[in-house]
Image (cartoon, coloured by chain):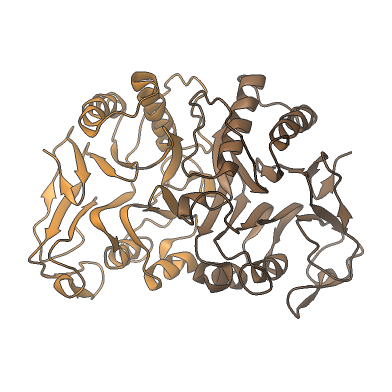
Chain colours: A brown, B orange
Amino acid sequence: MCQLLGMNCNTPTDIVFSFTGFATRGGRTDEHKDGWGIAFFEGKGVRHFVDHQAAIDSPIAELIKRVPIKSTNVIAHIRKATQGVIAQENCHPFIREAWGYNWVFAHNGDLKNFAPELDGSYLPIGSTDSELAFCYLMQSLRQHFGRTLPDNAALQQFLTKICAEIASHGTFNMLLSNGSALFAHCSTKLHYIERQHPFNTAALSDEEVSVDFSAVTTPQDRVAVIVTEPLTTNEQWTALQAGELKVFVDGRALV
Amino acid sequence: MCQLLGMNCNTPTDIVFSFTGFATRGGRTDEHKDGWGIAFFEGKGVRHFVDHQAAIDSPIAELIKRVPIKSTNVIAHIRKATQGVIAQENCHPFIREAWGYNWVFAHNGDLKNFAPELDGSYLPIGSTDSELAFCYLMQSLRQHFGRTLPDNAALQQFLTKICAEIASHGTFNMLLSNGSALFAHCSTKLHYIERQHPFNTAALSDEEVSVDFSAVTTPQDRVAVIVTEPLTTNEQWTALQAGELKVFVDGRALV
């Protein structure tokens, strides 16, 4: 199984702290060594780094830990291959365009007997069940909403339905972002935290590193972090429920 | 105006030598300092690096010069903004998926009164005339060829027609690749070279660097390099003709 990491903020924020703990799971403290990837929104653009090397051995992962890239929406993934060979085209996150926006997607889980009918508007490039599910999801969004990008409430409602349909084929924990909202669907395991003023010191569970967020933030900053397994030992993370789809905007979960 | 660099090979080859000279034009020997980008195919997957910093100042460009990434198809671009603000989403190369393949595109030139009708299948994310032309081109390909990916001869014929139509709005030098073929359209300026056995030493025109290709290749290797302005001083580059669209496969131009 893979691991997911997402971040959604109201101010461009670097993910160095969370990525450092997360990347450690890619080959050192955990078995996720079959590739990794991360996508940072910067305005409507995306910086996309994927690598089929273990995150712990990758010079690009090293660069991301060293050079802070500030973003309001980030999705990262470390891979333990279940379906699809170890190859560049099978590394999450995947990206497609719809309504003139980048949509970034990553999945944790395993789908069985999943063979949706695709009309050609979005086709998988690699051989994973994850990218297939992403293509089906994007096709469904476009078929349902036509030429107009819906609002977040409508997206949440429709995505909850499509995710439930996909999750009937297995485990479907996923993160999806269009650069303004971040959608998180939990099928078995996903946790989140909202950090805001007053900020405290957080200690990573995977590395002997801690950070005093109050020293690197302003009182207006809000950051939501969504992850498979909690990253810190001294904060209260909330578990999403099975079948729940949460939407994060400006560092906060919408009800 | 921007500059383009493409590479098409029969064996995965690193582009460190050519990129070193090319990136120097991004802010030092030339005025192209409004961003840069490069995309490397690795199988069907792509590594995509774009940055709205000048290539000469970018830590990611530095990484690419230091860590050789081997690829059979590469497209790079350095930008002098003519249309569209300096932003991540306006950096070439652009990527879209069609027929389950990544299509990578970069453009040099400037289009006027270009407002094609888009059906929503491919929409620009940024505000450049270049990405608009790419979306129109991909939409035209999909409309014309339907569900089946055509062969290179059919693509060459159809792309020549579409590129002529787009070029009627201004300058349209472009590079396009789907990971197996690289298509180069010349409207005003594009040069190429095919390197093969016996390999010689090449000297960069922008940096005091030379490389003896015979020491880093095998006799079977073939590499085509396509670029706005020749990169080396001691080799014979061929200029493409206005309106010409060449297809490169396995390091060689098809007739």
Residue lying furthest front: A113
Residue for point 76% across, 28% down: A161
The vertical placement of A31 against A252, above or below, is below
Q: Is residue B87 visible?
A: no
* Residue A116, x across and y down, in percent: 58, 28
Q: Is residue A180 visible?
A: yes
The vertical placement of B212 against A73, above or below, is below
The vertical placement of B190 against A88, above or below, is above
Using residue A51 as the reference point, say whether residue A65 is left or right of it: right
* Residue A55, x across and y down, in percent: 57, 67
Using residue A122 as the reference point, say whether residue B21 is left or right of it: left
Name the image quarter holding residue A231.
Answer: bottom right
Using residue B104 as the reference point, say whether residue A121 is left or right of it: right
Q: Nearer the viewer, residue B194 or A158?
A: A158
Residue for point 71% across, 70% down: A21
Quarter in which the N terminus of chain A is drawn: bottom right
Quarter in which the C terminus of chain A is drawn: top right
* Residue B213, x across and y down, in percent: 17, 70
Name the image quarter holding residue A249.
Answer: top right
Q: Nearer the viewer, residue B75 or B221?
A: B221
Residue for point 79% across, 52% down: A190
Residue for point 42% across, 33% down: B98
Using residue B156 as the reference point, say whether residue A249 is left or right of it: right
* Residue B9, x across and y down, in percent: 23, 54
